[in-house]
């Protein structure tokens, strides 16, 4: 009896040791036609509960449940409940929950929850929550919460909360809260709170709170609070609070103040404009207090104007030019300095 029990256990284990085989109803001729089940290759219509052995579908692939693994290619239409997935999807992908591709997703992807790809998303992506790729996202993306990418985003992107990438962000970007990129931003960017970049910002950037870059900012920048750049600001910068950068070239309009080391252009700052020590200004500044710790080339207009070295003109209630001869260092209304 003991021997029979051991034999029964051994026989029961044999199916588990044998390689699994796909099970499906084949209504195709040379893989062309209709297949119901886990058919590896179909050109036409393939319907399956859950994919395991998918290799290639050219046509329509319909599934009821998520795949065991994202394998095979779908070229045409992929439909899934609650999600559809494959190694590569080229065409239209619709998942009542989500859409996923191990390598790339190209074409149109629509999912109430999310769409994702390991390397690339190209085309039109519409999701209720978000879309993301480990590589690039190119085309038009609409995410109820956000859109993200590890390798760059290019095109028209709209995120209810945010749009971000570790690479470069280029095109038109609209985000409810913030938009940012590790490698630079080019184009039109609008965010409810902030726009930021570890590299440069080029184009038109509008944010309810702030605009900032580790590199340079060029073009038109508008922020409710402040604009700052580690590598310089060039163009037109408008901020409700302040603007600051080591180098500024262009027009600056602020609600409070602005500061820089090297300035070329014009500035309107009601309360405060400052040039740091050993810096220089070339242009026009209109501010309540112009404090130029470096060299002034040009015109300052304010209540109090101070320049360490004046090679231009000061107009204000009190004008101080520390480089002038003793009798002209402090003058009311107007003060001037000689040019080299």
Image (cartoon, rainbow, N blue to C red):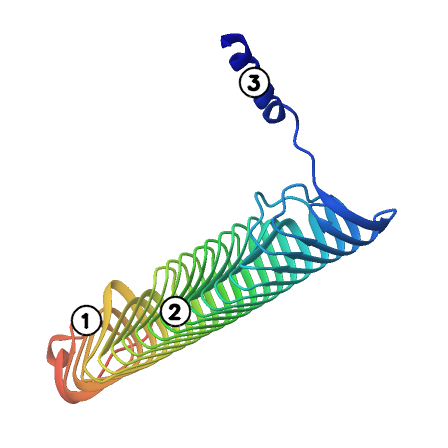
Residue 95, above or below 19: below
CA gap between label 2 and label 3 equals 60 Å
Residue 334 visible to an observer of this rendering: no
Question: 279 or 106: nearer the eye?
Answer: 106
Which label's residue is closer to the chain start, 2 or 1? 2
Label 3 residue SS: helix
Q: Residue at x 20, y 86 (%)?
A: 302
- Dot 2, crowdedness within 10 Å: few (<14), some or many (≥20)? many
Query: Which label belongs to residue 323?
Result: 1
Judging by the rendered image, the residue that carries numbered circle 2 is 161
- Give the image location of residue 308, x and y in percent: 19, 70
Which label's residue is closer to the chain start, 1 or 3? 3
Q: State the image quarter where residue 222 is shown.
A: bottom left
Residue 15, above or below 232: above
Label 2 residue SS: loop
- Give the image location of residue 218, x and y in percent: 45, 70
Which label's residue is closer to the chain start, 2 or 3? 3
Label pair 1/3, CB-CB below 8 angstroms: no
């Amino acid at each position: 009896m003991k021997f029979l029990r051991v034999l029964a256990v051994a026989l029961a284990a044999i199916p588990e040791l044998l390689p699994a085989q796909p099970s499906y109803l084949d209504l195709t001729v040379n893989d062309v036609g209709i297949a119901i089940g886990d058919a590896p290759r179909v050109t036409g219509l393939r319907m399956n509960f859950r994919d395991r052995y998918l290799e290639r579908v050219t046509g329509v692939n319909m599934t009821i449940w998520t795949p065991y693994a994202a394998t095979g290619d779908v070229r045409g239409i992929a439909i899934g409940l609650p999600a559809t997935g494959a190694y590569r999807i080229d065409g239209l992908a619709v998942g009542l929950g989500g859409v996923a591709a191990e390598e790339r997703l190209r074409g149109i992807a629509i999912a109430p929850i999310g769409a994702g790809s390991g390397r690339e998303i190209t085309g039109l992506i519409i999701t209720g929550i978000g879309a993301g790729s480990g590589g690039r996202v190119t085309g038009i993306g609409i995410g109820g919460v956000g859109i993200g990418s590890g390798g760059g985003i290019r095109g028209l992107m709209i995120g209810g909360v945010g749009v971000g990438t570790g690479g470069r962000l280029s095109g038109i970007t609209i985000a409810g809260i913030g938009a940012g990129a590790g490698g630079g931003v080019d184009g039109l960017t609008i965010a409810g709170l902030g726009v930021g970049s570890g590299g440069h910002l080029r184009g038109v950037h509008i944010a309810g709170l702030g605009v900032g870059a580790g590199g340079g900012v060029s073009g038109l920048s508008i922020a409710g609070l402040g604009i700052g750049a580690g590598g310089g600001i060039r163009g037109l910068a408008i901020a409700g609070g302040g603007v600051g950068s080591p180098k500024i070239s262009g027009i600056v309009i602020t609600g409070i103040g602005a500061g820089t080391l090297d300035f070329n252009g014009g500035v309107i700052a009601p309360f405060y404009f400052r040039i740091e020590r050993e810096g220089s200004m070339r242009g026009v500044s209109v501010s309540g207090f112009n404090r130029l710790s470096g060299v002034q080339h040009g015109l300052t207009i304010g209540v109090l104007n101070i320049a360490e070295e004046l090679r231009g003109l000061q107009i204000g209630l009190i004008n101080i030019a520390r480089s002038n001869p003793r009798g002209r260092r402090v003058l009311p209304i107007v003060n001037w300095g000689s040019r080299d």
